[in-house]
Image (cartoon, rainbow, N blue to C red):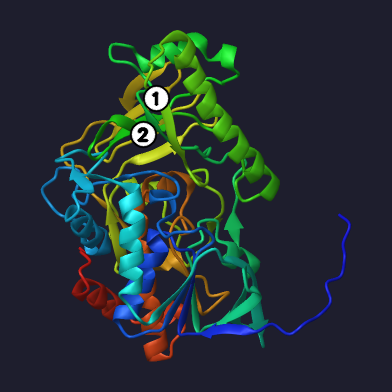
Amino acid sequence: MKRIVEPAKEIPVAEECDICIIGGSCTGVFAAVRAARLGAKVVVIEKMNSFGGVATQGLVNYWHSQYDTEFKKQIAAGMSLEVVERLGKRNAVAEIKECPHKAFMFNSEELKIELDEVVTEHKNIVPFLHTHFAAPFVEDGKLKAVFVENKDGRQAIKAKVFIDASGDGDLAFRMGVPFVLDDFLQPPTTCAKIRNLCPEGVNYYETVKAHYEEFGLEKDCGWSGEIPGCKDIRMYAETHVFNTNASDARQLTNAEIKGRRQTRAIMDIFRKYAPSENMILLSLASYIGIRETRRFAGEYRLTEEDVLEGKSFDDTIANGSYRVDVHNKENGGFLFKYLDGRQENFTFFGMEKGRWRPERKVNPTYYQIPYRTMVNRKVDNLIFAGRTVSTDKAAFGAVRVMINLNQTGEAAGVAAFQALDSGKKVCDINITKLRETLKSGGSILL
């Protein structure tokens, strides 16, 4: 690769704060709010024009269950439910009772505004939208600041503790935290809101199966869902961009273009073979929905066995009951593994049921995520939250959904404040106090 030399220059410091968060997804916003409520000054850096990440810019408008698999015990609450209650005041959310796959569906556009409100209510949170993280600034071996780029040019944000909620772990990567990037990554999906795509009485999947090759599509299948109050509009996540590493700039660019083209191809199938005069493409995701890129090495790596056997941890900071869900590298679809031993494999060709282990009388009904998956001693003032947490591939398939990752954000915010308050490294904070503080702020820890 050819190189040029950028002349050295002084960089203005735009803000000095206690905690700097890279990424304004719900994970990042919830981290900011929990830290701010404890008294920290927080800066949140978000590359897009709104907060919320996949839930807003990605159009994925579902959060999963806050109960165990038997719906007998509530295992999660915190800011996810706080935001759901706020959306409910505007009829922008609907609850789905006792469904293992969906608990709340919401209006993503209303969520954008609600997250603005959540952030701006806290005067000690300084938000930066349309702002890209560029590089870390390290002095005497310690992370002291991050460089960002926005309309004001290149600037620095100084902080004492940093939270990487960027999804791809951009800060952790540049700080040299070890990570895994598999040869097979769960493929990303471009989501779309479409009105009257599939006419009543027409089978969506049979129509696509009959004509996908004509329109340049691969064997694929996905899912779709409703939007509160919009009976004729659905959110579609029916395609995948296979063989994509979305942490690579060129591959990400190609995936964005291909994902939009896939949406048009699906619509063209129905325009030709099952037309509806009212079919309209209303919106496309502002960025492709990335399922998996780098998984970082923490002080502990959560495993498939930990999840499927419901292992408990002394440093638990989140609970989940969503199944192991790994999207296939070809033929679309996904492999589900449930805590009760069932297994389902959905592909272009249909669904196969089986078991990943024999039946038994007692099954776990939820699993836990330990705090140690979010820190690495290589950088003693950095916490990674969201889909950067330390897991193996199968465990990642379970914990990667938003209701779980939202909890890691809350834990990161509280842990960052506690490190500041105690003068300790993020790996060495008092876990008992961390859990007590999370509970007092509305989290459920078992």
N-term-proximal mark, 2 vs 1: 2
Farthest residue, direction front: 277
Residue 424 relative to residue 146: left or right: left
What residue sits 41% from the left and 13% below the top?
275
Residue 77 relative to residue 186: left or right: left
Task: Quickly name the residue at label 2.
Answer: 336
Q: Which mark is residue 346?
A: 1
Residue 38: image quadrant is: bottom left
Q: Nearer the viewer, residue 123 or 409?
A: 123
What residue sits 53% from the left and 15% below the top?
212
Q: What amino acid is at disc 1?
A: Phe
Residue 65 relative to residue 148: left or right: left
What residue sits 49% from the left and 31% below the top?
328
- Please identify the quadrant where the C terminus is shown: bottom left
Q: Are marks 2 and 1 in contact (CB under 8 Å)?
A: yes
Q: Position of residue 426 (x, y in %)?
A: 45, 79
Q: What amino acid is at disc 2?
A: Phe
